[in-house]
Image (spheres, rainbow, N blue to C red):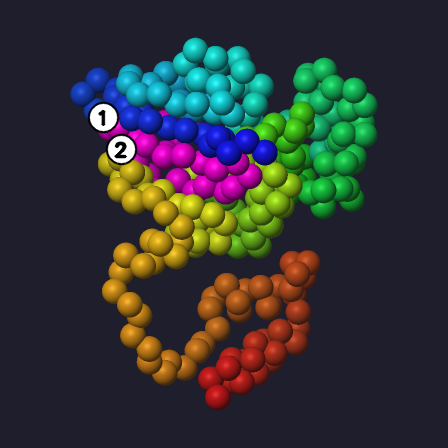
């Protein structure tokens, strides 16, 4: 595998009138890694993704994706990427399988039905494949959206705030999907405003603030920026996430014994 960065951003700037959105952004994304672009609303995350996916032109600077310049080789960039926006772009009238078959046909791929069935299996949607997408939960719809993005096996995928508006279980389902993508060799650039999402998923995290990257590193490197932790005995209590997942179970069905089990686990942990 080439050691060249999958994505390279150098001095990217973008302004709308007098409003400077990006002010000289620089970073590299290694192939087969998950790179999180972390920032609050209005930090410039979506603008940068639109530039990298050739939907928007930068005012200054340079960027390459999969070795292709985003300004002069836009067609090659588009063939190398897939973009999943903040809201699932599925046809709710069609079934999950029909959505996948449609995209495979639009990409002029052979055996679109087999491609659709394979992706339904990979994303745990086989049982729901014959149902209209309008009946899907938020997490299922997002998984279908990501599956559609993978048709044609793009080496690089952009996920722009993929868990916005999802419930806790659906968020975890999407996280598992993203991890599977990276394990399969896909390079993932993820934008998010959720600190725990970046912490759970990313190999490297860049913090975008007011149009510039103010810090870029691994989770361990970022944590090392703060003073060393002071060790104290603290009685551990279960987090709300642990309580929620224990109560609903893996399948989302209520576990009537969960409250007792959670309380017992918490008591054991504190001893």
* Residue 128 visible in the displayed image: no
| In this picture, residue 10 sits left or right of residue 160 | left
- Residue 33, image x, y percentages: 52, 41
- Residue 159, image x, y percentages: 50, 35
Q: Nearer the viewer, residue 268 or 128?
A: 268
- Residue 38, image x, y percentages: 37, 43
Q: Which residue is mark 1?
A: 20
Give the quarter of the image for residue 213: top left
Q: Is residue 26 magenta?
A: yes
Q: Which residues are magenta?
A: 21-49
Q: Is residue 4 magenta?
A: no
For residue 4, the mark is: none
Q: Nearer the viewer, residue 190 or 97?
A: 190
Per the image, label 2 sits on a secondary structure element best described as loop
Q: Is residue 190 above or below residue 106?
A: below
Q: Residue at x 65, y 35 (%)?
A: 147
Q: Residue at x 59, y 30 (%)?
A: 155
Give the quarter of the image for residue 45: top left
Q: Residue at x 78, y 24 (%)?
A: 112
Give the quarter of the image for residue 62: top left
For residue 211, the mark is: 2
Decide which of tag 2 and tag 1 comes sooner along the chain: 1
The answer to whether mark 2 and mark 1 are in CB contact below 8 A is yes
| In this picture, residue 141 sits left or right of residue 22 | right
Q: Residues within 10 Å of mark 1 (few under 14, many from 20)?
A: few
Q: Is residue 112 above or below residue 243?
A: above
Q: How many marks?
A: 2
Per the image, label 1 sits on a secondary structure element best described as strand
């Amino acid at each position: 595998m080439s050691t060249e960065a999958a994505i390279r951003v150098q001095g990217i700037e973008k302004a709308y009138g007098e409003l400077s959105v990006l002010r000289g952004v620089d970073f590299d994304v290694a192939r087969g890694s998950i790179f999180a672009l972390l920032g609050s609303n209005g930090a410039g995350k979506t603008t940068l993704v639109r530039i990298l996916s050739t939907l928007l032109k930068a005012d200054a600077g340079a960027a390459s994706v999969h070795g292709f310049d985003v300004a002069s080789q836009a067609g090659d960039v588009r063939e190398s990427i897939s973009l999943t926006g903040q809201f699932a772009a599925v046809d709710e009238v069609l079934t999950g399988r029909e959505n996948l078959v449609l995209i495979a046909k639009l990409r002029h791929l052979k055996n679109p039905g087999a491609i659709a069935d394979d992706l339904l299996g990979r994303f745990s949607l086989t049982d729901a494949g014959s149902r209209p997408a309008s009946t899907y939960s938020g997490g299922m719809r997002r998984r279908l959206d990501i599956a559609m993005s993978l048709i044609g096996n793009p080496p690089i995928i952009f996920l722009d705030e993929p868990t916005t508006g999802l419930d806790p279980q659906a968020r975890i389902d999407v996280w598992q999907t993203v991890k599977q993508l990276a394990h399969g060799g896909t390079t993932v650039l993820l934008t998010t405003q959720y600190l725990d999402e970046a912490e759970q998923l990313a190999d490297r995290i860049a913090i975008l603030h007011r149009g510039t990257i103010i810090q870029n590193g691994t989770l361990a490197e970022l944590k090392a920026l703060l003073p060393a932790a002071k060790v104290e005995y603290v009685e551990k209590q279960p987090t709300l996430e642990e309580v929620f997942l224990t109560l609903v179970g893996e399948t989302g069905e209520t576990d009537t014994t969960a409250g007792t089990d959670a309380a017992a686990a918490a008591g054991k942990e504190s001893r």
